């Protein structure tokens, strides 16, 4: 937890790298500010691996059925970016990242070096992993357009659930096996805005329980705000 200029207020194990899961969709969204978001692209599920060859996403691992329903048709990059954040769409994210290029995303955040489900990259030991401090620093660089998208987030049972009702929150969640994360830009009325990042690595703990624990941390963080 800290100011948007990167000044920490309260932290614990903040320098420990943890698998990013879907938090990596925010630097993708930021990188997309440099491309024509009103351009339409073909919706497809196979992509070039960062290490060569191709890989394919699976619909069962995605929370965004709308993009999968459009396979073979086109959709705007602006709408795909929105779905990548508010629905945490994996296919939508990779379609946007294909257009920005992986290098452009890595330029935004060096710890993000590959697309979602790039199994050849995983086999080569390349993963997206970053610390809470890294994500907090990124939140201080989120442009207004991307923060606006994050305010439409569907998944609100982590940080937003731990804050007082009505508190403006722009958040992005992430979860994979044994990991549940949330990070947010919080703008209390008449107070300094702040970044809050909660990363969890809880073996065998369901996502719902992970989110409940994140909400508990958010409640404590609210009480510790400067």
Image (cartoon, rainbow, N blue to C red):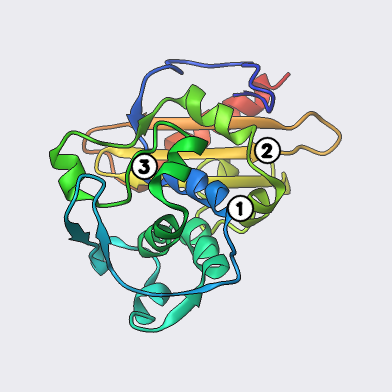
- In the picture as drawn, the residue positioned furthest to the right comes out as 190
Q: Which residue is mark 2?
A: 186
Mark 3 or 2: the one toward you: 2
Figure quadrant of residue 140: top right
Which residue shows up at 63% across the image and 41% down it?
Answer: 142
- In the picture as drawn, the residue positioned furthest to the left comes out as 123
Figure quadrant of residue 184: top right
- The answer to whether 198 is drawn above or below residue 52 in the figure is above
Mark 3 or 1: the one toward you: 1
Which residue shows up at 41% across the image and 61% down it?
Answer: 89
Q: Residues within 10 Å of mark 3 (few under 14, many from 20)?
A: some
Q: Real-space Cα distance between discs 3 and 2?
A: 22 Å
Mark 2 or mark 1: name the one nearer the start of the chain: 1
- The answer to whether 201 is drawn above or below residue 78 in the figure is above
Q: Is residue 57 left or right of residue 210?
A: left
Which residue shows up at 20% across the image and 44% down it?
Answer: 51
Q: Real-space Cα distance between discs 2 and 1?
A: 22 Å
Mark 2 or 1: the one toward you: 1
Query: Residues at badges 3 and 1 in contact (C-beta under 8 Å)?
Result: no
Mark 3 or mark 2: name the one nearer the start of the chain: 2
Q: Does the image show residue 23?
A: no
Element under label 2?
strand
Which residue shows up at 62% across the image and 16% down it?
Answer: 8
Q: Residues within 10 Å of mark 2 (few under 14, many from 20)?
A: many
Residue 65: x percent and y percent? 37, 73
Q: Which residue is mark 1?
A: 33
Element under label 1?
helix
Residue 27: x percent and y percent? 50, 43
Q: Which residue is mark 3?
A: 209
């Amino acid at each position: 937890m800290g100011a948007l200029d990167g000044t920490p207020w309260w932290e614990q194990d903040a320098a420990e790298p943890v698998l990013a899961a879907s938090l990596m969709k925010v630097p993708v969204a930021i990188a997309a500010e440099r491309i024509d978001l009103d351009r339409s692209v073909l919706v497809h599920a196979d992509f070039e691996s960062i290490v060569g060859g191709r890989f394919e996403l699976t619909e069962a691992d995605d929370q965004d059925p709308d993009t999968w329903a459009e396979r073979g048709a086109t959709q705007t990059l602006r709408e795909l970016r929105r779905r990548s954040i508010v629905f945490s769409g994996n296919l939508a994210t990779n379609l946007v990242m294909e257009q920005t290029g992986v290098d452009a995303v890595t330029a935004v955040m060096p710890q993000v070096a590959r697309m979602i489900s790039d199994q050849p990259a995983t086999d080569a030991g390349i993963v997206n992993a970053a610390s809470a401090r890294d994500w907090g620093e990124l939140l201080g660089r989120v442009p207004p357009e991307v923060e606006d998208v994050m305010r439409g987030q569907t998944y609100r049972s982590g940080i937003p659930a731990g804050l007082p009702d009505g508190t403006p929150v722009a958040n992005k969640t992430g979860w994979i096996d044994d990991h549940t994360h949330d990070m947010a830009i919080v703008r209390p009325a008449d107070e300094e805005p702040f970044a809050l990042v909660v990363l969890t690595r809880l073996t065998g703990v369901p996502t719902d329980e992970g989110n409940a624990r994140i909400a508990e941390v958010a409640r404590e963080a609210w009480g510790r705000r400067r």
